[in-house]
Image: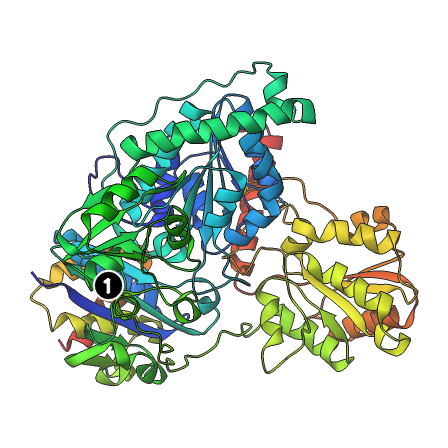
Amino acid sequence: MKTVNVKFAGLGGTGVIKASDVFAELVFELGHDVKKAEVHGMSQRGGSIASDVRYGDKVESPMIPEGEADFLVVFDETQVIVNEVFLKKGGTLLTEKDIDVTKLPNIKSLNVAMLGKLSRYFDFPPEKWDIALKKLFDPKFHAGNAEAFKIGRGE
Amino acid sequence: MLAFNPKDHRMLVSGNEAIALALLHSNVQLASGYPGTPSSEILETFSELGGYAQWSPNEKVAAEVALGASFGNARSAVTMKHVGLNVASDVLYTATYSGLQGAMVWIVADDPGQGSSQNEQDTRNHAKASVCPMFEPSNAQEAYDFVRLAFEVSHQFQIPVIVRMTTRVDHSKSILVPKEKPLEALVPNFVRNIPHRVMVPGYAKPAGKRLRAKMEDMRKWNETEGPNKMEMRSADLGIITSGISYHHVREAAPDASILKLGMTYPFPEALVKDFAKKCKRLFVIEENDPWLAETIRAMGIQVESKFDPVFRFGELDVTRVRRILNGETSPDPIPVKGKAPALCVGCPHRSSFAVLKDLGCIISGDIGCYTLAALPPFEAMDMMIDMGAAIGMGLGLRHVLPREQAKKVVSVIGDSTFVHSGITGLVEMAYNKPETGHVVVILDNSITAMTGQQEHPGTGRHLDHSPSYKIDYTQIAKAAGIQNVEIVDPVKNPEAMKKAVSEALAKDELSLIVAKSPCILALKSILAWDKANKERAEKLSKGEH
């Protein structure tokens, strides 16, 4: 299969890295070759942050080239302009505007709600997403995350 | 955190996690280091996996501890970022002469693109200059495999070995399949060998000759057994590359033949000559310095390479590799600027810099989160060069500036940075006291914050947060000869901080002010670690175990 590219972007502290970890874990468990890239360090102090997940039969570079992201998932509207150069023509842009954030039990679970939204574009069984969420989060967040995921997915 | 299940044959891990696992599977007895992005997670993960890991005050001491362990026939590792190797280079340049008995691997992480570093230096230059063998992994699997191989080679040839990482390899996750069998543990034991361990000229001169002969043996080993791969596809274009650039090349030029060098020093010359003969057009793709290109050209082989005025700077990626192969020389398009990082809301450094700015200080600064004070809105740091430099640079200014300017100079340094290289600055301050005196402020947030909240000798806890001796900055200052020493809380009592700094500035004396208030991000963890240590101590005193 052709490599699928998903770019997550936002500001430091909004759960960008965590969301990309969940998605990478999911596609890894489904048996694909996976690579994931991100930049740590100064970006943790509230600055712009982005994380790339690429999966397929064989992934080479861990970074999504410009104009090749199938999905751009942005947790903070201000970061669309910073990252849209990576989205391919006809690719899918998802932002927090696609979610009714007022329904979320906790605004910190926006990243999980965005994963819920993203999940509509893939054929993966919902329980596989749930397993990945459980693996990456502390059990005490699980109920809240499950709810946020459903809200994002629109169920 | 790396949840390692030995039954897992396939794992998704970062390069740093892969190295930690390789340290475990190499039966490393001691791993030391000083935190520095992008290398910091290696020792933390190794410790979580059950290995013995420690933070040292700085990279030089860390390397000396690991070298000593290898003299005792142990397998040891030291981790640092590229600029950390400058601090530890004094150890490296003679440890290659002496050689060792067990095995020692230096994990050195470069930061092409300067994600969080003050320069973009290329460790490959250090490897060549210090005559130290070097491996360059390109993904998590190779990070794991090459570290294990580096330990084997280090023991076989009795020499320290560098594994040169880059940010993208340290922090990218990819799939790792660990090996079934660990390396057999070495048994520590001291065997006296004075001519090989005491590098006085009489012993060091023959050691230098032995080292060059050893490099020739290792070059031959690298030609035939080194982890290099020749992938022949079309003969029209042959690309020589190493590290992460290999994966960018595979994607940008899928039909090209590739010579991927896993061990770049000593350089496998015959292999490169052989590959060059097989290709009509020869290209080098590498990040930062034209290190491979210059080495190959010095062998008399013509090779094309990147246009350095553009591509020497920053990371490579697939798009840039395509541009390099097209021979482009135009500047890269300027990306849309993201949001810059800033001091956290509630960060104690905000209060300290508000005071220093208010008093119109000339601020000689240092390396840590607080360097962010140089950016708007504070713009309250006038210089920053290297770890510990705040004190020396401040003293230099005090010595030469006209009195009214000299009286405004303050050196500002973080707690971890002070322990790393600020103590010798205090000694200098008392020994060569400027006429106007001097003022040093330690911004003590009780953690190494910038790199992700690591312990240091001033926190009173080890790398794994267990209790340790806690050094006292005020006692050190007094012993060094600093007259006025004061501790203030810049958050709870900014007026006291202001009073302390203005009084210190008014005197022609030497003053140390410790602005003590914990990192807002680390506070919860610090309280939990101290509570756990207190409970443990109480149990022990009651005789429970």
Q: In front here: A131 or A66?
A: A66
- Residue drawn at point x = 56 percent, y = 65 percent: B520
- Residue drawn at point x = 46 percent, y = 73 percent: A46
Residue B296 x, y percent position in the rendering: 37, 49
- Residue drawn at point x = 65 percent, y = 23 percent: B198
Q: Is residue B258 left or right of residue B331?
A: left
Vertical relation: B400 (above or below) B247: below
SS for tag 1? Answer: strand
Image mark 1: chain = A
Residue B79 x, y percent position in the rendering: 49, 44
Q: Quadrant of residue A140?
A: bottom left
Q: In front here: B472 or B398?
A: B398
Residue A81 x, y percent position in the rendering: 32, 85
Vertical relation: A130 (above or below) B209: below
Count neighbours of disc 1 (C-alpha within 10 A) and say few if under 14, some if 14 to 19, many if 20 or more.
Answer: many
Residue to which mark 1 is pinned: A53
Given the current orientation, which residue lies at the most extreme front position? B300
Q: Amino acid at mark 1?
A: Val
Visible in this render: residue B430? yes
- Residue drawn at point x = 84 percent, y = 48 percent: B480
Visible in this render: residue A131? no
Residue B302 x, y percent position in the rendering: 32, 54
Vertical relation: B146 (above or below) B362: above
Q: Quadrant of residue B161?
A: top left
Q: Is residue B232 left or right of residue B38?
A: left
Q: Is residue B181 left or right of residue B461?
A: left
Vertical relation: B246 (above or below) B223: below
Q: In front here: A9 or B232?
A: B232
Q: Quadrant of residue B485?
A: bottom right
Given the current orientation, which residue lies at the most extreme top position? B191
Q: In front here: A57 or A74?
A: A57
Question: What colour scheme does the image use?
Answer: rainbow
